[in-house]
Image (cartoon, grey):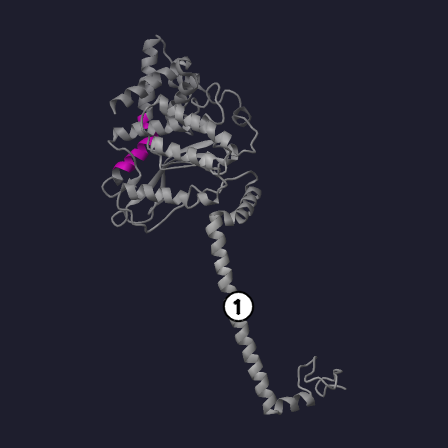
Amino acid sequence: MKCIHCNNEIDENDNFCSECGHFTAKGYLFLKDNKNRKQIEKGSSNKQKNRLSHLILLLFFGTILFFGFYIVRGDNLFKPILYLKKQVNNYFYGYDTSNIKNNNKYEKKIINNYNEAINFIKKDFSTQTWECFTSLEVKRIEDDLENKYSIPSVVFCDMSYDKVLIIKKEIDDFYNLFKVNIPITNITYTNLDNVNNVAFFQPMYQFVNINESINKYNKVNKTQILLNSYYFNDKNNKNLIDIVGNDFYVKDASLESTLVHELGHALSFSLLLKEYNMDNITLETKNNENIINSIINDFNKGIFSKRLVNDSLISYNELYNSNLKIEEYANNISKYAGLLDKNNQVVYDEVIAEAIHDYYLHKDNMKKESREIIKQIKSKIEEI
């Protein structure tokens, strides 16, 4: 039997053609019967209603099941997805990365006072740390460092307990040498675009309301130390000599002790703040905006650090009856301390940081040049 519309072979019991979809004579007569039509409509309607009720029931039980798992497992429920995300990031970067971002920015946020600014910084990191595979032992160390040294956020996301123990010792020993609070908002294990930075001190990262009018919105800045995941990841087998060569930093420097170099920058910055009668630059308002701009300009130009190093140089030359120039004085501490900027000028804050690094590693056996800088620093700390 052939379809009268398309000549497709059909069975005599078919109600429509499988090729063109037209009803056959049998199908036409079947639908013409009102009783058949009503039965079809009634059955179809019931079927749709049953399907909808089944879907609603499945959705209900699925939701209950999901929340049950979430209550039991918490954020760990998403760990497999986060693991895959981390592997994708590792492939993209080419090394074992951190899931923590240090460069988030926020606009149109109402920040009324310093405590709200600090809490906003804490929240930015705490809402990210659920993506980390951090052990409870590491979390306890993070909390301990935050509490002991008034650092709002310390995050060693996914670093091993053994490596974190070394870093904790570096921080503890530094604060034992210089018993002074320094204005760090966070120490963070994160990804840095510049792989030349083993670690990095950033005196001001503009964080909240940077594009808003200071007359309407207060701004929030972070003063942060960042540990580069390129070097501090557990799969990195390089030591510091492999990275920068021999004698670049002060003698006996290690990958972890470079953190002390960055803490040295933070200490120098805290002494600069005291020159301006400021404790920190975290909350920026229309009342202190000009002072903060002056502080950052001073830091970038090295005005304060140049004065401190030159005073140390004068003291050194008088004490040892010598006539060292600043370049030789800095190079005697380390190659890093003697590096010149694009204008062939000594970077004075690096001289200070390396002197602190030397003092940390060698105590009374530090170099004579470093000793004079440490004298100047401790003198200024006593004045605080």
Q: Position of residue 84 (x, y in %)?
A: 56, 47
Q: Residue at label 1?
A: 55
Residue 350 visible in the displayed image? no
Report the span colored magenta: 291-304
For the point 28% across and 31% down, which residue is it? 273
Type of amino acid at the residue the image marks with label 1: Leu
Q: Observer-nearest residue: 260 or 285? A: 260
- Whether residue 30 appears in magenta in the rendering, the answer is no
Up/down of 21 relative to 58, above or below = below
Up/down of 50 relative to 143, above or below = below
For the point 33% across and 48% down, which residue is it? 211
Q: On the rendered image, what quadrant is the C terminus found in?
A: top left
- Whether residue 303 appears in magenta in the rendering, the answer is yes
Q: Position of residue 222 (x, y in %)?
A: 35, 39
Residue 25 visible in the displayed image? yes
Q: Observer-nearest residue: 113 or 40? A: 40
Q: Main secondary structure of the magenta part?
A: helix
Number of numbered callouts drawn? 1
Q: Quadrant of residue 271?
A: top left
